[in-house]
Structure formats: C-alpha cells, structure tokens
Image (cartoon, coloured by chain):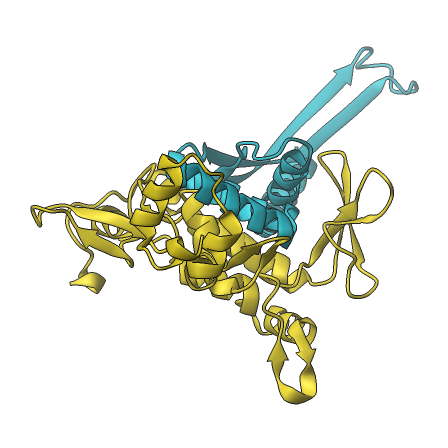
Amino acid sequence: MEKSRNLSETQWKIESASVNKPIDLNYIVKSWGPTLCGISLDPPRIQNPNDAMEAYLNAMKAFPEYSVYKKSPNQQVKILQSKCFGPVSTLGLVNDSLAYNYGLLYPTILDVFAALRSGLSPACRHYQLTNMFVHEENGLVRGDILFTRWLFWRAADGSWAPYNPPFVPEYLGKYGGRDFWTTSLACINDFILLGINATANSHAAAQNTQKIGPTPALQ
Amino acid sequence: MKLLSIAISIISGCTPLQTQENTLEQISTISNLRHSQFLANLSDAIDQRDAVPSQGVTNSGTATTSAIGSVGFSLTQPFAFARNTKTFNPMASLNWQNNWGITPVSDLQDLQNLRALYGLLYRTDGEIAQFIGDTMENRIS
C-alpha cells in the first residue's frame, strides 16, 4: 500500500484493480477525500461540510452547474466535472441553459449549502449560529455536521429523529400520517423558498414565460 | 317589490367587499399549501426513502362572489282578507368560490433537486457521508 501512496490516483486505481485487492476506501478518503469529498469513512462522517454538500448534490445529480467544468478534448463541449467524482452527467437543464431559456436560475450548490447552514432569514441564521458553535467563546464552528437540523419527528421506537432537538420543539401537526415538530419556523420557511428555487424550471412552465435568448438582466 | 329591491341592493353592495375578503383569504392559503406539500412529501420520503415528490406549482387563482335575489308570493285565497293565507317570501343569497390552478412539478431535474433537498432533512450526517462513500466506491470499481 505504501507504494500505492506515491502513485497518481488513476495509477493507484488501476493497480488495485489489477491485483484484485479490495479497495481501501478509507485510504482514498484520507489521501484526497477530505478536500474533495468532505467525508471520512471509518466511521462515515462529515469532515468538511462545504465539500460534503457538493459531493452529496453531485452524487444525487442535483443542482447541476458549470461552476466546476472542463472543456472536452476538442474544446467544444463543456463537461461537468465534479471535484469528488470526476466527470458527471445531468438529468436536465444546467443552470446557464435555464437562465438563457427562461431567465431563471437554480440555486448554485454553494447557495444551497449557505441557505441550509447559514439560513436565508435572520431568524434561521440566528438559530444555525446559536447551535453550530462548539465553543462560542473561541469561535469554533462544528465541521462534522452539514447544518443544525430544525425538523423532527418520532422514530418507531419513540425516540426523536433524525437527531435529538437542541431544545423543546414546537408541534407543527400531522402531515402524511406523521407528527412533526420544529425548533425553527424560520428555517422551515427558508427551506420552502429553497424548494421553490429548486423547481425553477417547473415554475417557468407554470408561468408560461419561456424566452428565447438571454434575459436583459443577464446581458 | 320595494322590499326586494332594498334587500338586493344591500347584498349587491356587500359583493365587492366580500370578494375582497375572499381574495385575501384565498391568498393566505398559499402558505398553508406550501407547508402541507412540504411536510406531506417529507413524510412520504421518510417512509419510502427517495420517493419522488408529489408537488405542484400554483399558477393562477380566482375568487368569485355572486349575489342572487328572488321573491315569491303565495296568494291561495286572495280575497279572504280575514285569513292569513298570503305570504311574501323574499330571498337573497351571497355565494363565493375560490379556485387554484395547479401545475404539477414534472421536470426531471426539478424533481431530482427536490429529492436531494428532502434527503438532507431525513438523513443523518453519517448517512449522507455513507452515501457519498458508496458513490465513490461505485465509480472506482
């Protein structure tokens, strides 16, 4: 394995495959994961929330954008390039195509990350900041979570899910046969706004505002 | 007849006010619709991981109010003045109806975006890290 550490990533992969050795994912994470994928695997946990969010959304093929891309060998086509996974494909319109056709944009991956981790509204931001610090006095912010959760429900065994709330939550009601509680209504509203932005293409269709060419604002 | 005219005039006068109230009330339901959609979809996704969200975009709304007036006379024995057989039934009603037009979210990329967002709420950070790891493994092998 020591020898492999000196090889390039591609060479290492080929070598690992050729000798039929089990791939040591933990090694990969240690060698290039923390700065590219933002996680460690033993146990699986977040190490860099920003990178982990990007890797998660890339893995889900969500919010495609050309923020990270490379030109194809003939320099004609843009290829979406994920920091964590390399080249990736999309299921629909990439952000700049959406802007060109409809004058609308999906939030960027960084926008999604910032909206969840820092909140869009003052009240949600306050909630996130209040519950994000490891030690408020020295400004250490938790790097092992993507954001502080604000929506809770009861698991089958009666415990809170997905985590224990930081304080007694407010009951929201029963939806889809499940009781929900929240510790921040502002964060719920921020998430709803994020959801509207995430469905920009459907909103364009609903509003029947297809355009041809860039919007004046983008010119 | 004069009485009927007065009644209809009063009701008709209320119509714009009632329409305004209905419109405001209808607009206030947007917030409920969004919250309900969000939480119902999340509930589904908790039960069935990565369920495709059932979501709609409200694209138009109408609030209508109508005033209806009518009068009925009943004169079974018109000349029997000593008897109480003559009736006069003026009737007026105010009806209102609110409608929303919904466009389902059916764009593939939009649905995938929503699915990813919901996944961030019901998955723990450890599960998200595991998913990233699984995707890495899948691409490497």
Residue A75: give x, y in percent of width and height: 8, 50
Which quarter of the rendered picture does the C terminus of chain A lie within? bottom left
Q: Where residue B45 appears, x then y in whole percent?
A: 62, 36
In the displayed structure, would residue B36 be above or below residue A189?
Answer: above
Whether residue B76 sits left or right of residue A15 in the image: it is: right
Q: How many marks?
A: 0
In the figure, residue B46 lies in which quadrant?
A: top right
- A176 vs A171, left or right, is left
Q: Where is residue A135 in the image (x, y as percent from the top left)?
A: 69, 81
Q: Can residue A107 be seen in this view?
A: no
Which x, y percent locates residue A65?
A: 31, 52
Q: Does B56 sit above or below residue A146?
A: above
Judging depth in this view, the residue of A164 and B11 nearest the camera is A164
Decide if residue B69 is in sight here: yes
| x 64%, y 31%: residue | B48
Which chain is in cyan here?
B
| Quarter residue A118 falls in | bottom right
Q: Residue at x 32, y 55 (%)?
A: A7
x 77%, y 17%: residue: B74
Q: Nearer the viewer, residue B9 or B123?
A: B123
- Of A106 and A137, nearer the camera is A137
Q: Residue A157 occupies which quadrant of the picture?
A: top right
**Which residue is outermost to the bottom?**
A137
Q: Say above or below: A144 vs A59.
A: below
The colour of chain A is yellow
Outermost residue to the top:
B76
In percent of the image, x 68 and y 61: which residue is there?
A: A185
- Give the vertical position of B4 relative to A164 (above or below): above
